[in-house]
Image (cartoon, helix red, strand yellow):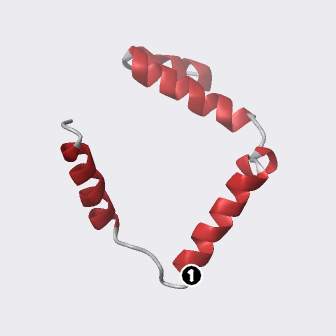
Amino acid sequence: MTRTEQLADAARSLSDEQFDGLLTFVRSLRGQPYFETASEDALASLDQGLADAAAGRVIAAADAFREIDAKIDAYGR
């Protein structure tokens, strides 16, 4: 079985939403790297996030998700 046939076989079992996600992913593999196409603001935000993490200014993912869930609940899901 060729690589194309393997991919087609796997794709047949996906929902429409999953298939659309797969296509988006495949297209991203062929595109330019994000760092070459991102805006200055986006790159600055990433740099700030890395600096914050290096300085220990982070919160655990579980805490962040708990805060997000609480905000969603407050808006009545």
The number of numbered discs placed on residues in the rendered structure image is 1
Which residue lies most toward the front here?
75
Amino acid on which the number 1 mark rests in the picture: Ala
63 in relation to 6, above or below = below
Q: Secondary structure at mark 1?
A: helix
Residue at 27% from the left image edge and 59% from the top image edge: 67
Residue 6 visible somewhere in the drawing: no
| Image location of residue 58, percent across then percent down | 44, 75
Q: Which residue is mark 1?
A: 54
42 in relation to 1, above or below = below
> Of 44 and 33, which appears nearest the observer?
44
- Residue 72 quadrant: top left
> Of 76 and 13, which appears nearest the observer?
76
| Image location of residue 61, percent across then percent down | 34, 64
Looking at the rendered image, the quarter that the N terminus falls into is top right
| Image location of residue 43, percent across then percent down | 72, 58
Residue at 34% from the left image edge and 71% from the top image edge: 60
Looking at the rendered image, the quarter that the C terminus falls into is top left
Residue at 20% from the left image edge and 46% from the top image edge: 74
Pointer 1 local density, CA inside 10 Å: few below 14, some 14–19, many at least 20: few
Residue at 50% from the left image edge and 21% from the top image edge: 20
| Image location of residue 2, percent across then percent down | 60, 22
Residue 55 visible somewhere in the drawing: yes
Residue 43 falls left or right of residue 60: right
